[in-house]
């Protein structure tokens, strides 16, 4: 009987965007943003998933620079590296500007239609 193929582990994400695509990593980032520096054990408790899974996700976040780790005795304390999230923030900010402009146009169009309807004007296509 032939041996079953060995699956190689998934390669780590190359950047912050790829790293935050995974929901559990976003949850870890959220926890660190809210709590500040946090021992690994507390993150495991908060995530309610097995410790090896949390460690795997923290390792990926550390590899792309989104979190830092400091050893204090037997504990590992994880901390969010905020500046590493700046490319994500900049990208979202650019999209926000686009959507704000787009939504403003939709609002203006709806208000014009509402004004015409309240005056009893026939509906015209814009």
Image (cartoon, rainbow, N blue to C red):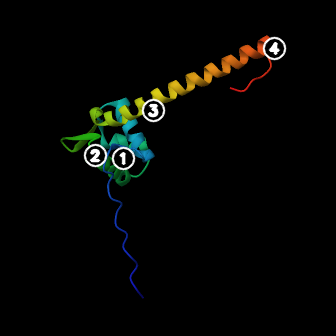
Residue 21 appearing in the image: yes
Mark 1 — residue?
19
Task: State the residue at coordinates (38%, 30%).
Answer: 34
- How many neighbours does mark 2 have within 10 angstroms: few (below 14), some (14-19), or many (20 or more)? some
The front one of 58 and 52 is 58
At 51% from the left edge and 24% from the top edge, which residue is drawn?
Answer: 101
The residue tagged 4 is 120
Among the two numbered marks 1 and 2 on one chain, the one whose residue lies closer to the N terminus:
1
Q: Quadrant of the N terminus?
A: bottom left
Residue 109 on image: x %, y % = 64, 22
For the point 29% across and 32% down, the residue is: 82
Return the x and y of residue 76 as percentages of the image width and height: 24, 43
Dot 1 falls on a residue whose secondary structure is helix
Instruction: Tell me the mark number nearer the camera, choosing from 3 and 2.
Output: 3
Count of labels in the image: 4
Q: Which label is found at residue 64?
A: 2
Residue 95: assigned label? 3
For the residue carrying disc 3, how many other residues have a C-alpha within 10 Å: few (<14), some (14-19), or many (20+)?
Answer: few
């Amino acid at each position: 009987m032939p041996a079953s193929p060995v699956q190689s582990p998934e390669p780590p994400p190359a950047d912050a965007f790829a790293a935050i695509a995974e929901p559990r990593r976003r949850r870890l980032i959220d926890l660190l943003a809210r709590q500040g520096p946090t021992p690994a054990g507390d993150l495991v408790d908060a995530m309610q998933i097995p410790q090896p899974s949390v460690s795997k996700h923290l390792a990926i976040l550390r590899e792309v620079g989104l979190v830092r780790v400091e050893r204090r005795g037997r504990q590992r304390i994880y901390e969010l590296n905020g500046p590493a999230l700046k490319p994500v923030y900049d990208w979202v900010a650019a999209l926000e500007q686009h959507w704000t402009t787009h939504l403003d146009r939709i609002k203006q169009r709806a208000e014009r239609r509402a004004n015409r309807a309240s005056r009893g004007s026939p509906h015209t296509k814009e």
